[in-house]
Image (tube, rainbow, N blue to C red):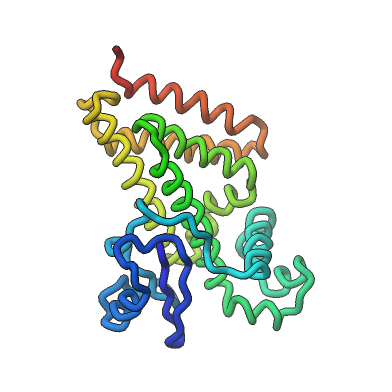
Amino acid sequence: MTHIFLRDDKFFAFKQIASNFRDIQTLIALNQKKELAPKVGSVRLVSERLLTCANTKEDMMDITSRQMEILQAAIRVIAQQGYEKLTTKNLAKSIGISDAALYRHFSSKKELVTMILCYFEDISCSVIHRINSQNLNPLEKLSHFVMDRYKLFTRDPDLAMVMFSEELFKNDHSFEEQLLSIMHIHRNEVMGYIREGQSMGLICSELNPLHIFRMVVGSMRLLVSQWNMSKHAFDLVEEGRSLLNTIIKLIEVQK
């Protein structure tokens, strides 16, 4: 999803999707008319109802290498020390730059966390695009999406800690709203796979697609949380694959 943030009358975009709006000027015009989403903290987020990530090009965020270094450092601090320890002093020290240099990239702690969530959303949208661009049946799409989550968190356990951090999201309601927007993207895509599978006779049509979604994603969240709390005591990918196979057996039409 292409995000347009409005702050001090300056726009900057993260190139994820513009399937409904090919011209950036259209987005700017809508923002000026206040036809986009309400303010989220100090920024205005493009409404999810106007943009979709189903057909996005696989473009990463328009972000510098230094900004990415700062984001990764912030993720580490939150994961290993907690949100309250994410201070300008701690963050600047961890990557060897001055406080002033840090402020040239991010004006506030809130903006930094917002960018972390955008980073996670960018990854999600790229994965969805990759899945949708392949010749896969709905069950294969569902499996690819879920297993990608497990592989992502295995590669980056600090990101898993941050995305499942209750401390982070209870500190600012706007973070909750942004995470909910990301979850809606996941829900819409996964339920699309489920409905397609039902129409093709691959998934039991008597089951409520929303309930199946909650089984799949809810169990995934529980497993990742257990993995986090156990200090990665088990193989997340293998346990995730076993859990997903069990769910597929429950929802798949037996032939």
- Percent coordinates x, y for residue 61 in the rendering: 52, 64
- Percent coordinates x, y for residue 16 in the rendering: 44, 61
* Residue at the limit of the structure toward the bottom, as seen here: 8
Residue 116 in the image: above or below residue 150: below
> Splitting the image into 4 quarters, where does residue 109 fall?
bottom right
Residue at screen point 29% across, 73% down: 36
Residue 133 in the image: above or below residue 101: above
Nearer to the camera, 10 or 237: 10
In which quadrant is the N terminus drawn?
bottom left
> Splitting the image into 4 quarters, where does residue 48 fall?
bottom left
> Splitting the image into 4 quarters, where does residue 230 fall?
top right
Nearer to the camera, 3 or 88: 3
In which quadrant is the C terminus drawn?
top left
Residue at screen point 47% across, 51% down: 126
Residue 170 in the image: above or below residue 239: below
- Percent coordinates x, y for residue 180 in the rendering: 39, 56
